[in-house]
Amino acid sequence: MLSIETQQENQHYILQPKGEIDASNSVQLDESIRRLAENGAKSILVDGSAIEYISSAGLGVFMSYLEDFQEQGITLKIFSLSPRVLEVFQILGLDQLIPIFPEKEAALNAN
Amino acid sequence: MEHTIQLICQTTALSELRKFLNKNLSQIMLSEKDKHQVILAVEEVCANLIIHSHHCNGSDHISLNLRQEDDRLVFEIMDKGKAFNLLDYEAPDLKTVISEKRKGGLGLILVKKIMDEIEFESQGGTNTCRLIKFFGS
């Protein structure tokens, strides 16, 4: 089960996926991020605190936007991942490609 | 210790797979970190078979046998689809995944990084992918 909530804080859009992200539902994450970008969001933050599990299908969604977002000047940051979910990013070295922060404040304050 | 589950070839079966693995791996002396990672690796192989070999055809099945041997855990994934030999698959590098905006390709990199040994055989129309994790590795 996956649900995704979105809220706006000033110029930032914060996505909060809740549950497990796998090949059956990663399209929901994809659509949520795409919708924000299409609506003109320039700062997208993913609150990872309620992500219980993520497989490569979910990781691939983040990866697929890296280049486009760089070209379009959109920032994508992730914060508050649980240690075991963070470890999956680290196994692949994705933590070197996507800015990941321990908490929301750090993500908001980072350039 | 030995357990088997049969899954229909639809991605919705992946949560059932995780429940099965969580339940049966709870009896094993495995750190939470290792448990989480082997579940991920097994799921990646099953998702790959379900999506690419069986095209999410709900009338097809794959089976998973989990057993503990002396110093290792063995996950045996069997199907009757088009043979996909993980050992022949050259995982893309991350730069390729990014530049081609691929949403796939990362899963099998994970499997190769998490598991200690991978074996594959195809006999009499049945493909078997064996993932092995040594305790304490």
Image (tube, rainbow, N blue to C red):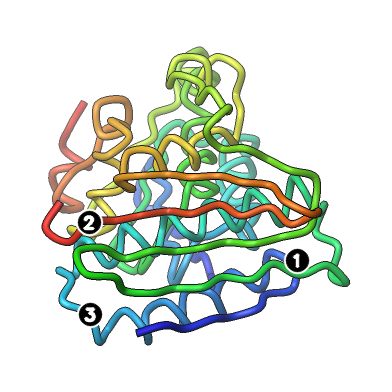
Q: In this picture, is A95 found above or below A36?
A: above
Q: Amino acid at mark 2?
A: Phe
Q: Secondary structure at mark 2?
A: strand
Q: Residues within 10 Å of mark 2 (few under 14, many from 20)?
A: some
Labels 1 and 3 positioned on one and the same chain: yes
Nearest to the observer: residue B70 or residue A97: B70
Q: Identify which residue, B34 or A1, lies in the foreground.
A: B34
Residue tagged 2? B134
* Horizontal and vertical percent position of residue B8: 74, 73
- Viewer-side residue, A40 vs B27: B27
Query: Dots 2 and 1: beta carbons under 8 Å?
Result: no
Mark 3: secondary structure? loop
* Mark closest to the chain's N terminus, 3 or 2: 3
Q: What amino acid is labelled 3 in the image?
A: Ile
Indicate which label's residue lies in the foreground, 1 or 3.
3
Residue located 24% across and 39% down the image = A90
Q: Which mark is residue B9?
A: 1
Residue A43 at x, y percent in the picture: 40, 35
Q: Position of residue B54 (x, y in %)?
A: 80, 54
Residue that label 3 marks: B28
| Residue B131 in picture, x, y percent from top left | 43, 53
Q: Residue at x 52, y 39 (%)?
A: A60
